[in-house]
Amino acid sequence: MASGTPVEDAIRQKITTALKPTTLEIYNDSHLHAHHKPMQGVTSRETHFRLVITSEAFQSKMQPARHRLVYSLLKDELAQEGGIHALQLRTMTPEEEAKRRTQETGTD
Amino acid sequence: MLSRTVFSRAVRQTAFSAIRPAATPVAPSPFLLSLAAQRRLISDAVRQAIDKAVASAPVVLFMKGTPETPQCGFSRASIQVLGLQGVNPEKFAAYNVLEDQELRHGIKEYSDWPTIPQLYVDKEFVGGCDIIISMHQNGELAKLLEEKGVLVKEGEQAEGETKE
Protein backbone atom coordinates (compact mmCIF):
# COMPACT_ATOMS: atom_id res chain seq x y z
CA MET A 1 0.00 0.00 0.00
CA ALA A 2 1.29 3.43 -0.88
CA SER A 3 2.22 5.62 2.06
CA GLY A 4 0.04 8.61 2.78
CA THR A 5 3.12 10.65 3.58
CA PRO A 6 5.68 9.88 0.89
CA VAL A 7 7.66 13.08 1.36
CA GLU A 8 7.90 12.71 5.13
CA ASP A 9 8.94 9.09 4.66
CA ALA A 10 11.66 10.12 2.23
CA ILE A 11 12.92 12.80 4.61
CA ARG A 12 13.06 10.32 7.48
CA GLN A 13 14.74 7.65 5.46
CA LYS A 14 17.39 9.87 3.87
CA ILE A 15 18.30 11.75 7.03
CA THR A 16 18.38 8.61 9.13
CA THR A 17 20.65 6.84 6.68
CA ALA A 18 23.05 9.70 6.08
CA LEU A 19 23.22 11.45 9.46
CA LYS A 20 22.41 8.70 11.98
CA PRO A 21 20.62 11.28 14.11
CA THR A 22 20.16 10.77 17.83
CA THR A 23 17.11 13.03 17.59
CA LEU A 24 14.95 13.44 14.52
CA GLU A 25 11.68 15.32 14.79
CA ILE A 26 9.67 15.97 11.66
CA TYR A 27 6.78 18.41 11.80
CA ASN A 28 4.48 18.81 8.85
CA ASP A 29 3.26 22.42 9.02
CA SER A 30 1.70 22.36 5.56
CA HIS A 31 -1.86 22.91 6.78
CA LEU A 32 -0.78 26.26 8.26
CA HIS A 33 0.23 27.47 4.83
CA ALA A 34 -2.36 25.77 2.62
CA HIS A 35 -4.17 29.03 1.92
CA HIS A 36 -1.28 31.22 1.04
CA LYS A 37 -0.82 32.31 -2.51
CA PRO A 38 2.11 30.20 -3.73
CA MET A 39 0.19 27.09 -2.68
CA GLN A 40 -2.68 27.72 -5.11
CA GLY A 41 -3.09 24.69 -7.32
CA VAL A 42 -0.77 22.57 -5.20
CA THR A 43 -2.51 19.40 -4.11
CA SER A 44 0.31 17.96 -2.01
CA ARG A 45 -0.22 18.08 1.73
CA GLU A 46 3.49 17.83 2.28
CA THR A 47 4.89 21.23 1.38
CA HIS A 48 6.06 22.81 4.62
CA PHE A 49 8.29 20.93 7.02
CA ARG A 50 10.12 21.78 10.20
CA LEU A 51 12.94 19.48 11.26
CA VAL A 52 14.86 19.15 14.46
CA ILE A 53 17.98 17.08 13.93
CA THR A 54 20.67 16.16 16.39
CA SER A 55 23.63 14.39 14.89
CA GLU A 56 27.35 13.87 15.35
CA ALA A 57 27.64 14.66 11.67
CA PHE A 58 27.21 18.36 12.51
CA GLN A 59 30.32 18.38 14.67
CA SER A 60 32.70 21.21 13.79
CA LYS A 61 30.37 22.53 11.10
CA MET A 62 28.91 26.03 11.15
CA GLN A 63 25.16 26.41 10.74
CA PRO A 64 25.21 27.16 6.98
CA ALA A 65 27.26 24.04 6.33
CA ARG A 66 24.87 21.95 8.43
CA HIS A 67 21.86 23.30 6.57
CA ARG A 68 23.54 22.71 3.22
CA LEU A 69 24.20 19.13 4.24
CA VAL A 70 20.50 18.59 4.93
CA TYR A 71 19.46 20.46 1.78
CA SER A 72 21.75 18.31 -0.32
CA LEU A 73 20.16 15.15 1.09
CA LEU A 74 16.70 16.47 0.20
CA LYS A 75 17.73 17.99 -3.12
CA ASP A 76 15.19 16.03 -5.16
CA GLU A 77 12.29 16.73 -2.82
CA LEU A 78 13.13 20.45 -2.84
CA ALA A 79 13.50 20.65 -6.61
CA GLN A 80 10.31 18.78 -7.48
CA GLU A 81 7.37 20.76 -8.74
CA GLY A 82 4.85 20.68 -5.88
CA GLY A 83 7.51 19.19 -3.59
CA ILE A 84 8.90 20.78 -0.43
CA HIS A 85 8.22 24.49 -0.55
CA ALA A 86 9.61 25.48 2.82
CA LEU A 87 11.98 23.70 5.16
CA GLN A 88 12.76 25.01 8.62
CA LEU A 89 15.78 23.48 10.26
CA ARG A 90 17.22 23.28 13.72
CA THR A 91 20.50 21.42 13.65
CA MET A 92 22.44 20.49 16.76
CA THR A 93 25.24 18.24 17.85
CA PRO A 94 24.52 15.95 20.83
CA GLU A 95 26.56 18.29 23.07
CA GLU A 96 24.59 21.31 21.95
CA GLU A 97 21.35 19.50 22.57
CA ALA A 98 22.45 18.52 26.08
CA LYS A 99 23.42 22.11 26.81
CA ARG A 100 20.08 23.36 25.56
CA ARG A 101 18.32 20.84 27.81
CA THR A 102 20.07 22.07 30.92
CA GLN A 103 19.40 25.69 30.01
CA GLU A 104 15.75 24.99 29.45
CA THR A 105 15.26 23.15 32.71
CA GLY A 106 17.29 25.84 34.47
CA THR A 107 14.90 28.61 33.50
CA ASP A 108 11.75 27.07 34.95
CA MET B 1 53.32 23.71 -13.72
CA LEU B 2 51.01 24.87 -16.46
CA SER B 3 47.83 23.28 -15.25
CA ARG B 4 48.26 24.92 -11.89
CA THR B 5 48.73 28.46 -13.24
CA VAL B 6 45.78 28.10 -15.52
CA PHE B 7 43.69 26.85 -12.67
CA SER B 8 44.60 29.57 -10.22
CA ARG B 9 44.03 32.26 -12.83
CA ALA B 10 40.66 30.82 -13.62
CA VAL B 11 39.83 30.89 -9.95
CA ARG B 12 40.82 34.52 -9.61
CA GLN B 13 38.69 35.48 -12.56
CA THR B 14 35.53 34.09 -11.13
CA ALA B 15 33.92 36.03 -8.35
CA PHE B 16 33.10 32.86 -6.52
CA SER B 17 36.02 30.56 -6.07
CA ALA B 18 36.28 27.20 -4.44
CA ILE B 19 32.78 26.11 -5.28
CA ARG B 20 33.48 23.69 -8.03
CA PRO B 21 36.50 21.47 -8.46
CA ALA B 22 38.91 22.28 -11.27
CA ALA B 23 37.67 21.23 -14.65
CA THR B 24 39.41 18.29 -16.18
CA PRO B 25 41.11 18.95 -19.52
CA VAL B 26 39.08 16.30 -21.29
CA ALA B 27 35.86 17.27 -23.00
CA PRO B 28 32.86 16.80 -20.75
CA SER B 29 30.91 13.66 -21.38
CA PRO B 30 27.38 13.85 -22.76
CA PHE B 31 26.22 12.74 -19.36
CA LEU B 32 27.85 15.70 -17.63
CA LEU B 33 26.51 18.06 -20.26
CA SER B 34 22.97 16.84 -19.82
CA LEU B 35 23.42 17.09 -16.08
CA ALA B 36 24.51 20.70 -16.46
CA ALA B 37 21.50 21.42 -18.63
CA GLN B 38 19.19 19.83 -16.10
CA ARG B 39 20.56 21.91 -13.30
CA ARG B 40 20.02 25.04 -15.37
CA LEU B 41 23.41 26.50 -14.58
CA ILE B 42 23.14 30.24 -14.32
CA SER B 43 24.62 32.38 -17.04
CA ASP B 44 27.60 34.66 -16.54
CA ALA B 45 25.31 37.65 -16.96
CA VAL B 46 23.07 36.53 -14.13
CA ARG B 47 26.04 35.68 -11.97
CA GLN B 48 27.54 39.12 -12.55
CA ALA B 49 24.22 40.79 -11.78
CA ILE B 50 24.03 38.89 -8.51
CA ASP B 51 27.67 39.76 -7.74
CA LYS B 52 26.66 43.39 -8.11
CA ALA B 53 23.57 43.01 -5.97
CA VAL B 54 25.53 41.28 -3.21
CA ALA B 55 28.07 44.11 -3.26
CA SER B 56 25.48 46.89 -3.48
CA ALA B 57 25.28 47.38 0.30
CA PRO B 58 26.99 45.99 3.40
CA VAL B 59 23.79 44.17 4.36
CA VAL B 60 21.79 42.56 1.56
CA LEU B 61 18.66 40.48 1.87
CA PHE B 62 17.18 38.51 -1.00
CA MET B 63 13.55 38.11 -0.09
CA LYS B 64 10.03 37.52 -1.33
CA GLY B 65 8.25 40.85 -1.48
CA THR B 66 9.58 44.13 -0.16
CA PRO B 67 10.59 45.16 3.38
CA GLU B 68 7.33 47.12 3.62
CA THR B 69 5.17 44.31 2.29
CA PRO B 70 6.88 40.93 2.58
CA GLN B 71 5.13 38.17 0.65
CA CYS B 72 6.28 35.32 2.85
CA GLY B 73 6.41 34.77 6.59
CA PHE B 74 10.07 33.80 6.55
CA SER B 75 11.03 36.94 4.66
CA ARG B 76 8.92 38.99 7.08
CA ALA B 77 10.61 37.44 10.09
CA SER B 78 14.04 38.13 8.63
CA ILE B 79 13.23 41.78 7.95
CA GLN B 80 11.86 42.16 11.47
CA VAL B 81 15.05 40.77 12.97
CA LEU B 82 17.21 43.15 10.95
CA GLY B 83 14.98 46.00 12.13
CA LEU B 84 15.23 44.89 15.76
CA GLN B 85 18.98 44.70 15.43
CA GLY B 86 19.01 48.33 14.31
CA VAL B 87 20.53 47.87 10.88
CA ASN B 88 21.10 51.27 9.30
CA PRO B 89 18.74 51.59 6.31
CA GLU B 90 21.49 53.37 4.39
CA LYS B 91 23.63 50.28 4.68
CA PHE B 92 20.92 47.89 3.69
CA ALA B 93 19.51 46.69 0.39
CA ALA B 94 16.68 44.25 -0.23
CA TYR B 95 15.99 42.45 -3.49
CA ASN B 96 12.57 41.09 -4.28
CA VAL B 97 13.11 37.76 -6.04
CA LEU B 98 9.45 37.60 -7.02
CA GLU B 99 10.05 40.44 -9.44
CA ASP B 100 12.74 38.63 -11.34
CA GLN B 101 12.60 34.96 -12.25
CA GLU B 102 16.27 34.86 -13.19
CA LEU B 103 17.22 36.22 -9.81
CA ARG B 104 14.80 33.87 -8.09
CA HIS B 105 16.41 30.80 -9.61
CA GLY B 106 19.89 32.24 -9.94
CA ILE B 107 20.34 33.18 -6.30
CA LYS B 108 19.69 29.60 -5.24
CA GLU B 109 22.56 28.30 -7.29
CA TYR B 110 24.76 31.31 -6.61
CA SER B 111 24.52 30.74 -2.87
CA ASP B 112 24.19 26.97 -3.10
CA TRP B 113 21.09 27.47 -0.98
CA PRO B 114 17.64 26.26 -2.10
CA THR B 115 15.41 28.63 -0.15
CA ILE B 116 14.66 32.32 0.25
CA PRO B 117 15.27 34.61 2.17
CA GLN B 118 19.06 34.75 2.04
CA LEU B 119 21.19 37.20 3.98
CA TYR B 120 24.57 38.52 2.92
CA VAL B 121 26.76 40.70 5.12
CA ASP B 122 29.85 42.24 3.62
CA LYS B 123 29.40 40.06 0.52
CA GLU B 124 29.47 36.91 2.59
CA PHE B 125 26.57 34.52 2.79
CA VAL B 126 25.24 34.35 6.35
CA GLY B 127 22.22 32.10 6.03
CA GLY B 128 18.47 31.81 5.69
CA CYS B 129 15.66 32.65 8.08
CA ASP B 130 16.37 29.94 10.67
CA ILE B 131 20.01 30.94 10.89
CA ILE B 132 19.15 34.64 11.09
CA ILE B 133 16.74 33.97 13.95
CA SER B 134 19.04 31.65 15.87
CA MET B 135 21.94 34.11 15.48
CA HIS B 136 19.59 36.86 16.67
CA GLN B 137 18.74 34.82 19.76
CA ASN B 138 22.26 33.78 20.67
CA GLY B 139 23.83 37.18 20.12
CA GLU B 140 25.99 36.24 17.15
CA LEU B 141 24.06 38.47 14.77
CA ALA B 142 24.42 41.53 16.98
CA LYS B 143 28.14 40.84 17.21
CA LEU B 144 28.53 40.42 13.45
CA LEU B 145 26.55 43.57 12.59
CA GLU B 146 28.38 45.56 15.22
CA GLU B 147 31.76 44.42 13.90
CA LYS B 148 30.76 45.36 10.38
CA GLY B 149 29.64 48.79 11.53
CA VAL B 150 26.24 48.60 9.89
CA LEU B 151 24.05 49.52 12.85
CA VAL B 152 22.44 52.88 13.47
CA LYS B 153 24.74 54.63 15.90
CA GLU B 154 23.37 55.54 19.28
CA GLY B 155 22.19 59.12 19.40
CA GLU B 156 22.26 59.42 15.64
CA GLN B 157 18.52 59.77 15.50
CA ALA B 158 18.62 62.72 17.86
CA GLU B 159 20.78 64.54 15.40
CA GLY B 160 22.60 67.59 16.67
CA GLU B 161 21.22 67.26 20.15
CA THR B 162 23.87 65.11 21.70
CA LYS B 163 27.02 66.72 22.99
CA GLU B 164 29.46 64.21 24.36
Image: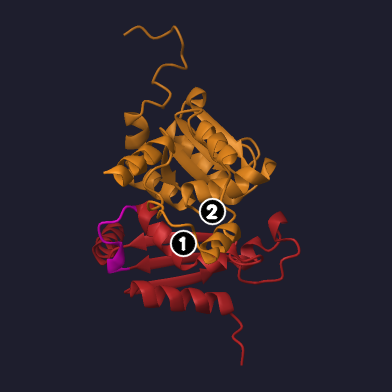
Chain colours: A red, B orange
Identify the residue at the far right of this view.
A41
Query: Residue A7, how many percent across, how many down?
Result: 56, 75
**Is residue B33 rendered to the left or right of residue A62?**
right
Magenta stretch: residue A58 in it?
yes
Q: Is residue B64 visible?
A: no
* Amino acid on which the number 1 mark rests in the picture: Tyr
**For the point 46% across and 32% down, which residue is it?**
B59
Which residue corresponds to mark 1? A71
Image quadrant in which the C terminus of chain A is located = bottom left
Q: Are marks 2 and 1 on the same chain?
A: no
**For the point 41% across and 58% down, which residue is it?**
A67
Say above or below: B133 vs A90: above
Q: Which chain does tag 1 point to? A: A
Image quadrant in which the N terminus of chain A is located = bottom right
Distance of label 2 from label 1 (alpha carbons): 9 Å
Dot 2: what SS?
A: loop
Please state the extent of the stretch shown in magenta in the rendering.
A55-62
Q: Are marks 2 and 1 in contact (CB under 8 Å)?
A: yes
Query: Residue B7, how many percent across, how many down?
Result: 35, 44
**Is residue B84 rendered to the left or right of residue A94?**
right
